[in-house]
Amino acid sequence: MSTKLARFAQKRWISSTTSTSNMYDPRLFREPISDVQELRKPLDADDERNFLFVKAMKSDATPVFYRDHVIDKLIRVCTKDGEKETSRKNVLSALEIIKRRQYKAWAKATDEEKQSIELDPFVIARKGIRNCHPLMKLQGVTRGGTTYQVPFPIEEPEAEFRAMKMMRDICRLRSKHGETHFKDILATELLAASQNEGSTIQAKQELHKTCEANRAYAHYRA
């Protein structure tokens, strides 16, 4: 009898079948709407949302004015050891530093120069990260016992992630050496990257140079 129980328990533990249960019954719940303009429209009389429940909305999809997809992704990339609140505080503090620096520059500028100074830190952060997007990546491909670093094109989401990762690693390295706090370095990098300057832009250019030097291995992609 014990042998049968052991076999049954072993089968249960090594089972690789996926669970088909869901906390949201598809007969009672519908997907949430995160578009503010869509939410403002009145519901029709026969709309299912009048008598059915709506699933809980994800935190990064909340339709509020102070949430931004790029900033939320940067917070997740900068998270270390699961301390997301610490990462959120650092990123938002960096945006506040950018706001203060830009406002000081705006206050000292002339009327003509004020037109070209961007005061929104979210716009500056998005522009800086967009300027850091790499066009290619290096991936190891083994042929005949030798591994070659082959350049591959990358999609927009991965390019955004790699740009954030490069910026995060540079900021962590400089803060580890005791130059200043992480939030100050991140603010400086975002401001510099928005003008196509800074260490992250240099790292992207070095990556492109390496990909250009390894273009002879491009036929190993297949």
Image (cartoon, rainbow, N blue to C red):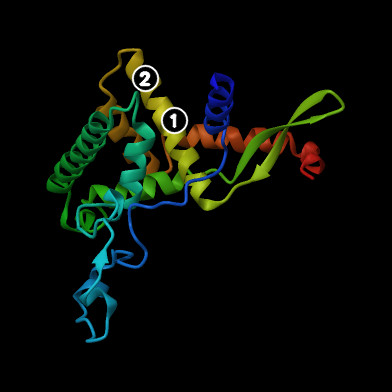
> Mark 1 or mark 2, which has the lower sequence index?
2
Circle 2 sits on which residue? 174
What amino acid does circle 2 point to? Arg
Q: Quadrant of the N terminus?
A: top right
Identify which residue, 177 or 49, lies in the foreground: 49
Q: Position of residue 40 (x, y in %)?
A: 19, 75
> What residue is shown at x 22% (from left), y 75% (from top)?
51
Residue ranking furthest to the front: 1
Identify which residue, 106 or 74, lies in the foreground: 74
> What residue is shown at x 33% (from left), y 64% (from top)?
31
Mark 1 nearby-residue class (10 Å; few <14, some 14–19, many ≥20): some
**Whether residue 195 is visible:** no
Q: Are marks 1 and 2 in contact (CB under 8 Å)?
A: yes
Circle 1 sits on which residue? 199
Q: Distance of mark 1 from mark 2, alpha carbons?
A: 11 Å
- Asked where in the image residue 198 lies, by quadrant, the reply is top left
Identify which residue, 60 or 12, lies in the foreground: 12
Residue ranking furthest to the bottom: 45
Mark 2 nearby-residue class (10 Å; few <14, some 14–19, many ≥20): some
Asked if 134 appears above or below 200 in the picture, the reply is below
What amino acid does circle 1 point to? Ser
Q: Position of residue 138 (x, y in %)?
A: 65, 35
- Asked where in the image residue 54 lies, by quadrant, the reply is bottom left
Helix, strand or loop status at disc 2: helix
Helix, strand or loop status at disc 1: helix
Residue ranking furthest to the top: 177
> What residue is shown at x 42% (from left), y 26% (from top)?
170
Describe residue 199's horizontal placement relative to residue 14 as left or right.
left
